[in-house]
Image: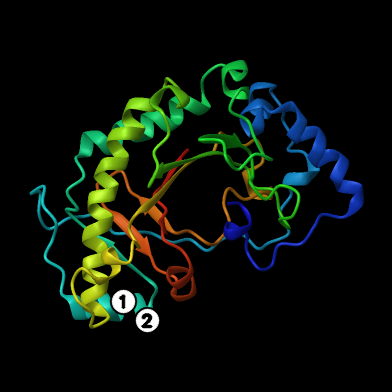
Amino acid sequence: MYDMMMCDTCTPWPDDRKPELKAFDDKKEGVKGLVDAGITEIPRIFLSSTDPPEECSIDNTSGSEEVQFSILIVADVGEASETWGFFQISNHGIPFDVLEEMKDGVRGFHEQDTEVKKQFYNRDDSSSPFVYNSNFDLYSAPTTNWRDSFLCHMAPTPPKTEDLPKVCREILVEYSKQVMKLGKLLFELLSEALGLKLTHLNDIDCSEGLLVLGHYYPACPQPELTIGTSKIILVVFKSSCKIILVVFKSFIRTTRLTYPMYRVP
């Protein structure tokens, strides 16, 4: 599960850093635990060697307030996917209150009592229905991100409700239903853009899987020295009810999972 998501440039940390990584990991408190401890300087493992990211902005205006899926021209979808690798969707049909509740659920999980969260902390057992940790690639990435995350496989075999954290279990189920419906529609658009039958990608089960990620970025005492996330982002759900879908050519041929991801500051 984790290897599939690792970038090609990931290399192991030097041996002298491994004890620090392990000490951080063994506490099972994540980045939020460092913030709660009142640190004023970030640990060495979070220092980034990359250049600061360039400023960028996204137009969050919408031409329609109707809760319906905008009519997208198939040719434009195909060109955007092939040329740019992503496109933005307005009026996708997922209710605003569901998006807001999902964000609250992500924040609620990461901000709850540490001892409650620890029961979900896992790095070795990929069969767990719900996994919480800090940096899935902690021991191999060139930079440790200032971020805690959870992930949960919601389809094709959803977990038992009682196996999900109480603070976000109900919204995880509802949100997943909404995303699965949207995913099927997106694969219809992509099928047509590829010159295939409308249902082709859905018929070969491209939309049968769903992995939900919930990222959390607590306040950092030295934000200029670290980064919150790597450059590869698959799907970003904006609070303005817009979606950015990123399509990687090599990725879509090798996996049948859809990755909705929430980023909560």
Residue 27 x/y as whole percent: 74, 27
Dividing the picture into quadrants, the one containing residue 77 is bottom left
- In this rendering, would 65 be left or right of 51? left
Image position of 81 with respect to 117: above or below: below
Residue 175 x/y as whole percent: 30, 38
Total number of numbered discs in the rendering: 2
Residue 207 x/y as whole percent: 32, 58
Q: Residue visible at 62% across and 16% down?
A: 115
Q: Which residue is mark 1?
A: 80
Dividing the picture into quadrants, the one containing residue 164 is top left
Residue 180 x/y as whole percent: 28, 49
Q: Which residue is mark 2?
A: 83
Q: Nearer the viewer, residue 107 or 206?
A: 206
Q: Is residue 60 visible?
A: no
- In this rendering, would 14 be left or right of 97? right
Tell me which amino acid carries mark 1. Ala
> Mark 2 to mark 1: distance in Å?
5 Å
Query: Are the residues flagged by discs 2 and 1 in contact, CB closer than 8 Å?
Result: yes
Q: Is residue 213 visible?
A: yes
- In this rendering, would 245 be left or right of 182? right
- In this rendering, would 21 be left or right of 245? right
Q: Residue visible at 62% across and 63% down?
A: 7
Q: Circle 1 — which element? A: helix
Circle 1 packing at 10 Å, graded few (<14), some (14-19), many (20+), is some
Tell me which amino acid carries mark 2. Thr
